[in-house]
Amino acid sequence: MIVYGITHRGAVRNENQDRIRYSLMGGGELLAAVLCDGMGGAQAGSVASTIASDTFMSHAGNSLDESSSPSDMHTILTEAVNYANIKVYDRAFADFSCMGMGSTLVGLLVNGKRACVVNVGDSRAYLIGKRRITQITRDHSLVEDMVSRGKITRAQAQNHPQKNIITRAVGVEASVSSDLFDVKLSSGNRLLLCSDGLSNTVSSEEILMVSGNNENLEKACGALLELALKRGAPDNVSVLLCER
């Protein structure tokens, strides 16, 4: 397993409130990774994403081992998100300057050919093959709910004025519900974690094309970031790629 991640404040924002953390273990067969996109006034978004990512990794990285089954990984991911939620919520409750802060979270565990993904909010995970890309996660957002109810089309959602309103976030409430997904990995498959700074400016088809044109993960991540920046990158942009 090889991994590379990159994060950038984008072309408009003065601060980068995204955070990426990952840890390779077990001779490269085990991976724990997380990407968080903070929200909140002043510096609070950065505080939220830092606490969430650090807490998630502290639990997930220390709990995953070669014997972990998919069921074990579900438990690890759920617990890691819950611990992150408690830490962010408690800090917001204790610090007036952090009131109302929160963070999206998309996390990943890999054990050999088995992978599990967890998400809260609209940061995403994709599975990329040689000719196909599949969005693993489902956004917890107002617009995604409107699409699922048939109120708007997927095409209308792409440019909807409320597309950045999320319906779940880590640390906003005393508890949080997360979604879990199992993924089977084949040789050459790539897993992508990204913030909405990428997914709002670069389509899934373009992500597939860029990935296919760059065998090197660092170059692929750099090319995706460059494409987002060329399009104005109004938000922070974070990309993490891993490959078996």
Image: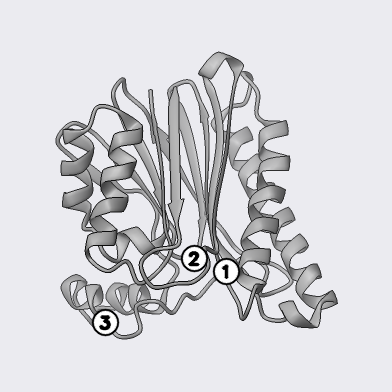
Give the distance between the C-alpha atoms of the residues marked 2 and 1, in whole angstroms: 5 Å
Tag 2 near tag 1, CB within 8 Å: yes
Name the amino acid type tagged 3: His
Give the distance between the C-alpha atoms of the residues marked 2 and 3, in whole angstroms: 17 Å
Residue 103: x and y, percent? 58, 66
- Looking at marks 3 and 1 on the same chain, the residue that comes earlier in the sequence is marked by 3
* Residue 185 figure quarter: top left
Q: Which residue is mark 3?
A: 160
Give the distance between the C-alpha atoms of the residues marked 3 and 1, in whole angstroms: 20 Å
From the viewer's perspective, is 216 left or right of 43? left
Q: Which residue is mark 1?
A: 169
Viewer-nearest residue: 13 or 50: 13
Residue 20: x and y, percent? 54, 48
Name the amino acid type tagged 1: Ala
Residue 164: x and y, percent? 40, 76
Quarter placement of the N terminus: top left
Q: Which residue is mark 2?
A: 121
